[in-house]
Amino acid sequence: MNIQSQKLDLIEWISKLNDSSVIEKLRSIKDNYAKSKDWYDDLNDEELASINRGLQDIKEGRLNSHDSAKQIYGKYL
């Protein structure tokens, strides 16, 4: 069973739960997981390099205004 199937199986099971103590335990697991995991830790090398290039652009003043960005990228939105 792949991870997508496992998630769907859990969603279905949770949707049928009526035991508030189990739901509360699941909420606690979710909250603790969210606190312990930073999305930044899951980025791959290419994503990190892209972020660092953007930060370097900011430091060196290579920026576009909001209006300029809307003109450039508006057709894609």
Image (cartoon, rainbow, N blue to C red):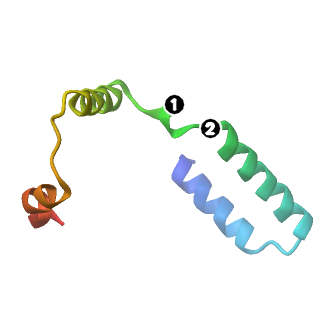
Q: Label 1, secondary structure: give it.
A: helix
Work out which quarter of the rendered image holds the C terminus and state it: bottom left
Q: Are marks 1 and 2 in contact (CB under 8 Å)?
A: yes
Q: Which mark is residue 62?
A: none
What residue is rendered at 55% in x and 47% in y? 3
Instruction: Give the side of residue 73 with respect to residue 48, left or right.
Output: left
Label 1, label 2: how many angstroms apart (C-alpha)? 8 Å
Pick the residue in front: 76 or 5: 76
Q: Mark 1: few, some, or many residues within 10 Å (few <14, many ≥20)?
A: few
Instruction: Give the side of residue 20 with respect to residue 77, left or right.
Output: right
Q: Mark 2: few, some, or many residues within 10 Å (few <14, many ≥20)?
A: few
Residue hosting label 2: 37
Q: Does 77 appear above or below 47? A: below
Q: Label 2, secondary structure: give it.
A: loop
Snapshot quadrant of residue 15: bottom right
Snapshot quadrant of residue 44: top left
The amino acid on which the numbered mark 1 sits, given as a three-letter code, is Asp
What residue is rendered at 35% in x and 24% in y? 45
What residue is rendered at 56% in x and 55% in y? 5
Snapshot quadrant of residue 27: bottom right
Picture coordinates of residue 8 (x, y %)?
59, 61
Picture coordinates of residue 10 (x, y %)?
68, 60
Q: How many marks?
A: 2
The amino acid on which the numbered mark 2 sits, given as a three-letter code, is Lys
Q: Does 39 appear above or below 19? A: above
Picture coordinates of residue 16 (x, y %)?
76, 75
Q: Which mark is residue 41?
A: 1
